Amino acid sequence: MECYYKDDSITIYKSDNLELLRSMPDNHVQLIYCDVLYNSGKDFGDYNDNLGSAVEAVEWYRPRFEEMKRVLKSNCSIYIHCNWRLDSYLRILMDKVFGPSCFRNRIYRQHSGKRGFYSNYDSQMDTILYYIKNPNDFIFNEIYGDTENIVPLFEYGTLAGRDDIRSIGDVKIDLKNQQKHWLVSPSQFEKMAANNEVRIIDGLPYRYSTVIPMGNLWNEPEMLDSYKRIDLSEAYATPKPDAVLNRIIQVSSHPGDTIADFFLGGGTTAAVCKKLGRKFIGCDISQKACDVTIQKLKTIAGTYNK
Ligand SMILES: C[S@@+](CC[C@H](N)C(=O)[O-])C[C@H]1O[C@@H](n2cnc3c(N)ncnc32)[C@H](O)[C@@H]1O
C-alpha cells in the first residue's frame, strides 16, 4: 500500500485500517495502541463516531482485532482505548481473539474533573483494555523513581497456585499457613531477592525498591483531558494526553521498537513515539487527521513553518 508520509522513523497511511492491516506482514510490530471509535453517535466533524448497535460495532471490530493479533510480534502488547459504551463488548471480543489468558488489565483513565449537573453519576473514566500476545513472554518495563517504595508481596486469603513455600536466605515463608497468598510469581520473587529488594517483616514479604508502583487507575493531573487546546492539537477534536501514551510506550516497548496506531487521529501516539525514539506506523481514514499528525511531527523536528 502506498504511504502518505514517511520520514526516518515514521510512516503514515491514509486508508481504512482494515485494508492496511490486511496488507501488513505477520509479526511486524512490537506494540499496538488504538484509541478506537467509542460509538457515541457523535459527529466530531473530523470523523463520525457511529458504528450502529453494539453488536454491529463488535462485528466491525472483529476482523480488525484479528488482523492486529496477526501483525503483532509474539512477546508484545496491545492496548485498546474505549469507554463505557463498548468496553464490555470489546473485552469479550478481545478474549475471543487473543484468548482469556492474554488479558492483563483493564486500565481506568480519568478524562475530566466534575462537570455540571446530571441525573446520573458523571462518567469521568474511559477504559484501556490491555492484552498481550503470549502470556509466558511479554515486555513490561518497570519505571523507576528517586524514592524507595515499600509494597507488600502478599494478599489476604489463600489461593491455589499462589501458595508455595519460598525461602530467602535461611528464612522460609509459608503464606498459606498465614491465610495469605503470593502476589508475584516464583521467578519474579527470585529476581527481587537477587536485587536485594525483599524484606521480611513479621513473617511477611515486602519489596523495598525505587520502582514506582503503578495501579490501573490513571488519574494523575497530566492524564486528564485539557480543554485549553493550544497550537496544533487545537486542530483536532479528540486528542489524548501525551502522558497516557508516554506511560504505555515506556512500559511496553524498548527504544527502536515499532509501534502502530490504526486510529491515528491528531497523532498523539506518533508524536510521543518520535520523542521516545520509537519507530511508528500510523493509519487514519481522514485526510485531516493525517495532515494534523504530519504538521505535529514537523513541529517536533523544527521543520514546520506556520
Ligand atoms: C478517537 S480518534 C483518535 C484520537 C487520537 N488518539 C489522538 O490522540 O488524537 C479516532 C480516529 O479513528 C479514525 N478512523 C475511524 N474509522 C477508521 C477506519 N476505518 N480506518 C482508519 N481510521 C479510522 C477517525 O478518523 C479518527 O481520527
Image (cartoon, rainbow, N blue to C red):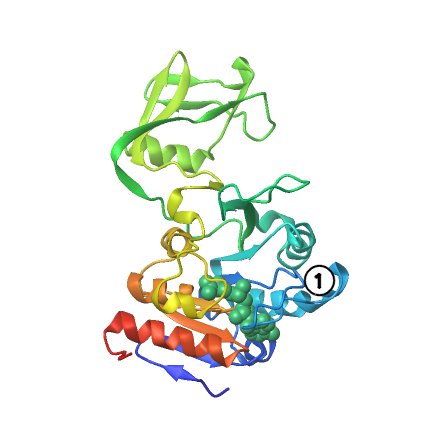
Residue 63: x and y in percent read 66, 70
**Is residue 9 at least partly visible in the picture?**
no
Q: How many labels sit on residues?
A: 1
Is 282 on the left or on the right of 101, as rendered? left
Residue 42 or residue 252, whichever sits in front: 42
**Is residue 235 at least partly visible in the picture?**
yes
Quadrant in which the C terminus is drawn:
bottom left
Residue 248: x and y in percent read 42, 53
Q: Secondary structure at mark 1?
A: helix
Q: Residue furthest front?
A: 117
Ligand 1 image position (quadrant): bottom right
Per the image, the residue denoted by label 1 is 58
In the image, residue 70 sits, relative to residue 220, either above or below, namely below
Which residue shows up at 62% across the image and 57% down it?
Answer: 98
Q: Residue furthest bottom?
A: 2
Instruction: Classify 10 Å Cα crowding around label 1: few (below 14), some (14-19), many (20 and above).
Output: some
Disc 1 Cβ-to-ligand 1 distance below 8 Å: no
Which residue shows up at 69% across the image and 67% down it?
Answer: 51
Residue 268: x and y in percent read 41, 64
Q: Residue furthest top?
A: 202
Which residue shows up at 58% across the image and 20% down it?
Answer: 157
In the image, residue 193 sits, relative to residue 121, either above or below, namely above
